[in-house]
Amino acid sequence: MDASKSVEVVVTVDVHAAKELLNSGHRYLDVRTNEEYSKSHVENALNVPYMFKTQEGRVKNPEFVAQVSALCDKEDSLVVACNSGGRSLKASTELLAAGYKNIKNMAGGYSAWVDNGFAGDTTPAEELKTACKFRR
């Protein structure tokens, strides 16, 4: 198989590993909507929505990779996260396909971050998390 056509596999890490990566210099790329991000987010996070809410439902951000490219180099080490892990997995796959080298998907997303007490906020956890059809 031609190396240029190989498919990169997304590496998924739990929130504890993600926190360690962030402490060692990785950047946090939050791919939730602007509304979700403004509610609460990881300190110093970059926000580039992977999807937008519209009247028709969620639609993919057609400028996602271009917007990430305006903020990050392809060699930057990124932890990619959303609310629960679905959008970030798709975003991570797309970034790897676009030539990004050091991408880690955070399992459980920002909800898992909050559940593990990493939000550092006195607001009750349920108020920080965004409703998700995959969470109870």
Image (cartoon, rainbow, N blue to C red):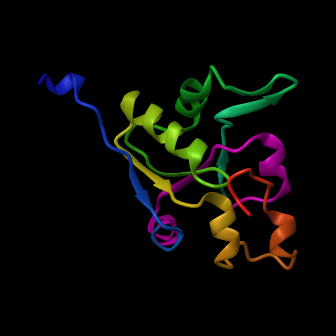
Is 125 above or below relative to 46? below
| Stretch in magenta | 18-43
Q: Residue at x 49, y 65 (%)?
A: 18
Is 21 a magenta residue?
Answer: yes
Is 4 above or below relative to 72? above
Q: Residue at x 63, y 20 (%)?
A: 62
Q: Quadrant of the C terminus?
A: bottom right
Question: Which x, y percent locates residue 25?
Answer: 46, 62
Is 7 above or below relative to 15? above
Q: Residue at x 87, y 74 (%)?
A: 123
Name the outermost residue toward the left.
1
Within the image, what quadrant is residue 33 found in?
top right
- Given residues 23 and 115, the one toward you in this image is 115
- Given residues 126 and 70, the one toward you in this image is 126
Q: Quadrant of the N terminus?
A: top left
| Left or right relative to 110: residue 70 | left
Question: Which x, y percent locates residue 41?
Answer: 73, 59
Q: Residue at x 52, y 30 (%)?
A: 69
Question: Which x, y percent locates residue 15?
Answer: 53, 68
| Left or right relative to 38: residue 70 | left
Tell me how many marks there are: 0
Within the image, what quadrant is residue 7 found in?
top left
- Given residues 133 and 113, the one toward you in this image is 133
| Left or right relative to 3: residue 112 | right
Is 51 a magenta residue?
Answer: no
